Amino acid sequence: MTKLELLVNLGYKVDPFKKARFDTGDSLRVRRILAMAVESNAMVSIVGERGVGKSEAINAALHKLGVRRVDVARAQKEKISIADIETAIILDLSDEAPLGRGETRSRQLRRIVGAASQKEKIVVCIEEAQRLHGATLKSLKTLREIEWMGERELFTVVLIGQSDPMNRPGVSEVRLRTDLVRMQGLFAGEAVGYVKATLGKHFEEEAIEALAGRPQSTNYLELQELCIAVLNYAWADGRQMATVGDVEAVGGAPKATALPKGLAKKQPVAALSAKDALKEVQARRAGGEVELKEVSAC
């Protein structure tokens, strides 16, 4: 059965995955870093594989910060030009139509951004930023340097992608002015908490721990897919409650590093709070277990 058909048969009226709001160590890190980035009008790249929770973490952080957000919505990201970004800023920050290009457009943009920046913090967000052209990235750096009433760098830029958008030749100067934040995905304890918060009533406790031990458990989308596959397997056997045997039949071998550091393998995996997960991230970074490249902005 498809996901929605299975959920309907299990008695759900709304997809529980859509309703779940789940803080993790990653999301707490992103929130803290973006808070500083916004105050500093910095340029930040936030990267991680598909389904790791980038957009959710960024949306929650920016909503909490109460910023004025500009989204560059063009679908063909590789064709985004600096003119497209200027147009998005003008349309989202004012009721004016973008004027012709060149000096006229530049003066309009400076006036609109300058006036808006006096009232609230501005954040320009670009999804799938790994597809941006190098020339666009270099022009974006220049755009950030517009001046209004003696102030420069009037807004924050958040680039969101599956890989580092600066990982290409010719953008070294932009890289030096950009912070890079790599999201790591769910820890085992966070995966336990996520399953319990969504479909937990249909999994035995040991089954939830077994789910958290699978390679897919670090990724929201893959963990969701695994949960649905396991429940489909149980449903085919006439049950609405999945067992550890169902997980083993569907999910393959567990990952070697599923359990948080210090837990014996037979010890139950406890759900992690966001703060505990953040401490785990920091501990692994200190021990060299997680590779993070965060370049200080110049």
Image (spheres, helix red, strand yellow):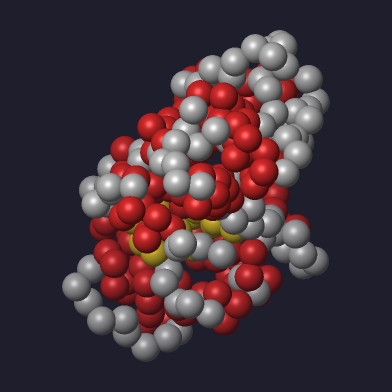
57 horizontally vs 43: left or right: left
Q: Is residue 282 visible?
A: no
Residue 75 lies, in percent from the top left, at 48, 77
> 150 above or below 2?
above
> 253 above or below 187?
below
Residue at 68% x, 71% y: name it.
Answer: 134
251 horizontally vs 116: left or right: right
- Of residues 277 and 245, the one drawn nearer to the viewer in this rendering: 245
Residue at 29% x, 73% y: name it.
Answer: 91
- Of residues 289 and 270, the one drawn nearer to the viewer in this rendering: 270
Residue 152 lies, in percent from the top left, at 45, 52
Q: Which residue of the protein is positioned furthest toward the left in this rendering?
A: 95
Residue 15 lies, in percent from the top left, at 33, 51
Residue 250 lies, in percent from the top left, at 64, 47
- Of residues 59 and 239, the one drawn nearer to the viewer in this rendering: 239
Residue at 28% x, 47% y: name it.
Answer: 11
Q: How many numbered marks are there?
A: 0
Residue at 78% x, 20% y: name it.
Answer: 287
Q: Specify the quadrant of the image occupied by residue 296.
A: top right
Q: Which residue of the protein is positioned furthest toward the bottom in this rendering?
A: 100
> 269 above or below 218?
above
Q: Is residue 141 visible?
A: yes
Q: Specify the quadrant of the image occupied by residue 98.
A: bottom left
84 horizontally vs 206: left or right: left
The quadrant in which the C terminus is found is top right
> 288 above or below 127?
above
Q: Specify the quadrant of the image occupied by residue 84.
A: bottom left
